[in-house]
Amino acid sequence: MLDILLSLLVLTGAGFTFVGSLGLLRLRDFYTRLHGPTKATTLGVGCLLVASSVYFSTHHTLSLHEILVTLFLFMTAPVSAHLLAKAALHLGVKSLAPVPPAAGPGPDGIGKPKP
Amino acid sequence: MKRLLPHPVLTLVLAALWLLLVNTFTAGHLMLGLLLGWLIPFATASLWPQSVCIRNLPTLLRYVAVVVYDIVLGSFRVARLILGRPASLRPAFVTVPLELRTDLAISLLANTISLTPGTVSVLLSEDHRSLIVHSLDTGDATTMVAEIKHRYEAPLKAIFESC
């Protein structure tokens, strides 16, 4: 019974990670592509970690290492996504969505040349 | 008291972190964890210009639950969008005006927005009064802003800025 539950968790995790990576291929500009691998994987990795924690807790001793992995992932993934997006704005990467004046390269934006 | 124990919350967090790292729970490791949690804040005091204050523990727990729920729900939504027709997506940059004033609360809000699937926080305006968010598929920008303010900003304000 437990094995079935664990297999389901691992498969769900792998599925979400796969779909997240597939987003890289299917989405059409840098900003939308950013959503695939950074996000759909959150739940994917989450499922894998829950499975790992339950497996090792039932087969060996209580294992809560995985909480740390989740914690560090939740702290670092948004920061890297934010920095990638911010760098893309600075460089004026092609975007499907209209870039707001405060963000784009231009007289008001962050891309403006510094005096 | 304040000088002997500058960051009580950080001390507890570091002790818990240590116990998770060694992956065993013994009295010795608990003591060692508390000792590290007591000493490390002195070494890193300059990284914490404002002391952190947390009010409303129930609100904090509810906030965490809401974020986890949104991550699960949002993951399914993003997966469907990726597997659906990418050509019909309506990506948009949305500006969210901020009511939060402390750096910690703003960075937590930005992190939460990036963590929930479908939205990434892109840019904080120079005066820290608005946050530009990129959304994968936006129906109505006003509704999205209202949702972010209601679901994330209001609780963060109650937790971190009420003292």
Image (spheres, coloured by chain):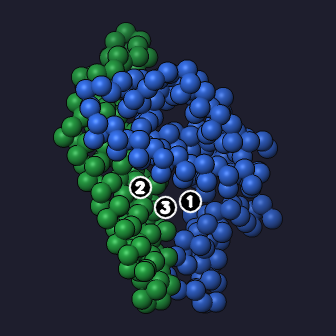
Chain colours: A green, B blue
Q: Do marks 3 and 2 both belong to one polypeptide chain?
A: yes
Which secondary structure lies at badge 2?
A: helix
Q: Residue at x 48, y 47 (%)?
A: B73
- The residue positioned 43% from the left and 80% from the top of the image is A2
* Mark number displayed over residue A71: 3
Which quadrant would the C terminus of chain B be assigned to in this image? top right
SS state under label 3: helix
Give amino acid for label 2.
Leu
Q: CA distance from mark 3 to mark 1?
A: 20 Å
Residue B39 shows in this picture: no
Dot 1 and dot 2 residues touching (CB under 8 Å): no
Q: Quadrant of residue B130?
A: top right
Q: Nearer the viewer, residue A107 or A60?
A: A60
Q: Which mark is residue B73?
A: none
Q: Position of residue B36 (x, y in %)?
A: 59, 75
| Residue that mark 2 sits on | A43
Q: In the rendered structure, the residue with mark 3 lies on which chain?
A: A
The amino acid pointed to by label 3 is: Leu
Q: Quadrant of the N terminus of chain B?
A: bottom right
Q: Secondary structure at mark 1?
A: loop
Vertical comparison of A21 with A84: above or below: below
- As shown in the figure, which amino acid type bears the numbered disc 1? Thr
Name the residue tied to disc 1: B44
The lab-note entry on whether marks 3 and 1 share a chain reads: no
